[in-house]
């Protein structure tokens, strides 16, 4: 009978969600070292980086499954369960994209043309910035739950999401410019490699897209 | 009366067993909220529980004890056969005690209050006759079992919404907390003291006029609030912890408030639940000594003391372990949330104690927690468990009744 009161409380998804976004960010941020190594042609180093990315992605996946397992339909929460699950999904996709893009580059031992290498690394960095901002916003979840999604804390998260939007727009602009730079040199390159380069740019850009969707989901939580 | 000592001895034995059970198991629910929120350490919680459970039982436990003792069974019907009332009360104590033992072994969420009331109604209705039960009074009690969780939930909702509005959603929650928390402390202390003075003390033989009751309650509450304000004023923000959790220091301010509500909760629990153990005991003592059913004797103070002591012993032997187990599980109740639930529950329970209505402490607390949840205060509440609690609410009454009927017939056969 003593357990009755304790058992009323379901497992809170808040801290696990914050932990998950932390892992997803680490996974995405590893791309910086990975691409730097790949551009240098240091495939041993790139391989180590790639292994870490895969490991983080697996960790994120395992945690995602665990969170889902502990969110049964019978839970009564201040925000809809569906919105939290959706947030978890887009967080996870940041890690997925990092794994996908590193997989293509590593599998094909792709070389990134020297003429766009600098611009490309900046583009990767900017995407990682977006993921970092997503992590920062999600880390406010516990404070949001405490303050009841209202007032000063809600305003703080809104401003973070706005900043996230700005960074995402910046990555979009850079992506367009990077494509243009690649377009200018593509005729000198192997056509199949060029096809995959476009693919790599697109997948990398999706990290910022997913980060932005994390922000959208947080905004949705605020609007309830 | 013949065999007077045997009856009183058995009743005291069963009564202490029941009080011990309440202390070992039930108190945990009242105290675990404070331990779970880390407002109190286990040792502090035990100390608070021991002192205030005892005070609550002795100072404010009289009215509910009277109800259990002579409010449920119609004594006039038994005027000619006083021994039947004794068998019945013994059977009720034993039935409720055993049912609680079975239930806690199996982890079923049952209430002490529901068991004992079910048991008394059971032996009276079946063992003596359907008219032997004061159905109007029983109806009131059962209604209060529906109303008390709802009321506690409603109060908890209002309190927590006010906390959100006044403190948590503000730009500088710490400054707001330091300003408003002493006010909450005042209200918590005022409610408990006032109800105790107005309703409880007369059973201990103290009579205080209405006007001086209010003055006294205000003075005591103001004193506690000022004391709280001084302690709160000394709390300095911890920038390192703040960085991780913006509300870290705010919660530390609420933790001071929670010490006060934890005392209130222990007091409220003692005042209502001690009756479950000593109400039947008091009935047996009165009938055995006078041989008259429904004699207008006052409740001996030593009976209340025995009840309070039994609870404290239960707490010291098994309760410590249960509190720490339950406390570890309810970390979601931070002080700002936990205090709202405790204050709402304690207020509801103390009012019921003052009016002499036995209600379930745990169910009231569950209602209060749900109220905080409705105010978007709790991360996740498992509605399946809440559903199970409501089922046990219903099942416990016939279970207690059934066992007490069996014991009643056994006692009637074997006891002199």
Image (cartoon, helix red, strand yellow):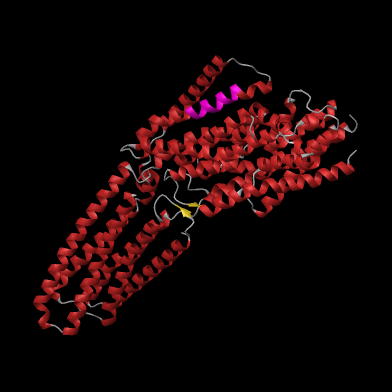
Left-right relation of A191 to A87: left
As rendered, which of B281 and B314 lies closer to the eye?
Answer: B281
Question: Image height check: is B31 above or below A141?
Answer: above
Residue B250 found in image quarter: top left
Residue positioned 75% across, 32% down in the render? B74
Left-right relation of A133 to B139: left
As rendered, which of B153 and A10 lies closer to the eye?
Answer: B153
Residue B106 found in image quarter: bottom right
Please identify the residue farthest to the left as the structure is shown: A184
Residue positioned 30% across, 70% down in the render? A97
Question: Image height check: is B398 above or below B167?
Answer: below
User: What span is in magenta?
Assistant: B187-198
Q: How many marks?
A: 0
**Residue B68 visible (yes or no):** yes
Question: Image height check: is B69 above or below B319?
Answer: above
**Residue B37 visible (yes or no):** no
Residue B98 image position (x, y, % from top left): 74, 47
Left-right relation of B230 to A54: right
Decide whether residue A123 is among the magenta residues: no
As rendered, which of B341 and B43 lies closer to the eye?
Answer: B341
Of helix, strand and loop, which mostly describes the magenta segment?
helix
Residue B167 image position (x, y, % from top left): 37, 36
Residue A108 image position (x, y, % from top left): 26, 82
Residue A174 found in image quarter: bottom left
Please identify the residue farthest to the front as the structure is shown: B131
Residue positioned 49% across, 56% down in the render? A74
């Amino acid at each position: 009978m003593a357990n009755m009161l304790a058992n009323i409380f379901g497992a809170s998804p808040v801290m696990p969600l914050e932990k998950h976004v932390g892992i997803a960010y680490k996974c995405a941020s590893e791309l910086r070292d990975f691409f730097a190594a790949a551009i240098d042609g240091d495939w041993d180093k790139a391989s180590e980086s790639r292994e870490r990315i895969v490991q983080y992605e697996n960790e994120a996946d395992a945690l995602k499954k665990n969170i889902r397992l502990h969110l049964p339909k019978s839970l009564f929460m201040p925000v809809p369960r569906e919105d939290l699950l959706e947030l978890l999904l887009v967080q996870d996709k940041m890690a997925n994209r990092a794994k996908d893009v590193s997989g293509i580059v590593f599998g094909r031992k792709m070389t990134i043309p020297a003429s766009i290498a600098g611009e490309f690394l900046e583009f990767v960095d900017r995407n990682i910035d977006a993921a970092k901002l997503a992590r920062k916003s999600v880390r406010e979840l516990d404070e949001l739950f405490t303050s009841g999604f209202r007032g000063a804390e809600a305003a703080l998260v809104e401003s973070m999401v706005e900043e996230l939007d700005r960074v995402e727009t910046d990555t979009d602009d850079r992506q367009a410019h990077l494509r243009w730079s690649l377009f200018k040199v593509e005729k000198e390159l192997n056509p199949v490699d060029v096809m995959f380069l476009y693919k790599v740019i697109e997948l990398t850009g999706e990290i910022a897209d997913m980060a932005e969707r994390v922000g959208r989901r947080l905004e949705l939580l605020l609007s309830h | 009366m013949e065999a007077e000592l045997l009856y009183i001895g058995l009743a005291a034995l069963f009564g202490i067993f029941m009080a011990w059970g309440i202390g070992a198991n039930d108190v945990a629910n009242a105290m675990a909220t404070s331990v779970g929120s880390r407002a109190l350490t286990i040792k502090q919680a035990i100390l608070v529980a021991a002192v205030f459970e005892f005070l609550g039982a002795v100072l404010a436990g009289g009215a509910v004890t009277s109800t259990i003792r002579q409010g449920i069974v119609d004594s006039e019907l038994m005027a000619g056969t006083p021994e039947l009332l004794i068998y019945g009360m013994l059977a009720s104590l034993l039935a409720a005690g055993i049912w609680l033992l079975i239930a806690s072994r199996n982890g079923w969420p049952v209430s002490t209050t529901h068991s004992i009331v079910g048991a008394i109604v059971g032996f009276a209705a079946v063992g003596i006759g359907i008219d032997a039960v004061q159905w109007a009074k029983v109806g009131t009690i059962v209604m209060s079992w529906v109303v008390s969780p709802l009321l506690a939930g409603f109060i908890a909702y209002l309190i927590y919404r006010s906390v959100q509005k006044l403190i948590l959603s503000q730009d500088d929650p710490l400054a707001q907390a330091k300003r408003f928390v002493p006010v909450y402390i005042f209200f918590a202390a005022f409610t408990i003291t006032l109800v105790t003075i107005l309703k409880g003390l007369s059973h201990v033989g103290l009579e205080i006029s209405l006007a001086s009751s209010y003055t006294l309650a205000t003075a005591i509450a103001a004193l506690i609030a000022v004391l709280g304000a001084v302690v709160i004023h000394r709390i300095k923000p911890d920038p390192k912890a703040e960085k991780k959790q913006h509300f870290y220091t705010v919660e530390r301010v609420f933790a001071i408030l929670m010490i006060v509500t934890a005392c209130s909760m222990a007091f409220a629990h003692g005042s209502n639940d001690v009756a479950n153990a000593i109400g039947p005991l008091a009935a047996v003592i009165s009938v055995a000594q006078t041989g008259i059913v429904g004699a207008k004797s006052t409740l001996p103070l030593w009976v209340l003391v025995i009840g309070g002591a039994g609870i404290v012993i239960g707490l010291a032997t098994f309760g410590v372990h249960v509190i720490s187990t339950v406390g570890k599980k309810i970390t979601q109740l931070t002080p700002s949330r936990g205090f709202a639930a405790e204050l709402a529950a304690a207020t509801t329970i103390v009012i019921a104690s003052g009016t002499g209505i036995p209600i379930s402490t745990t169910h009231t607390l569950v209602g209060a927690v749900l109220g905080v949840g409705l105010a978007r205060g709790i991360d996740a509440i498992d509605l399946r468990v809440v559903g199970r609690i409501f089922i046990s609410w219903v099942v416990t009454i016939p279970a207690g009744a059934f066992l007490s009927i069996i014991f009643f017939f056994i006692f009637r056969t074997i006891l002199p």
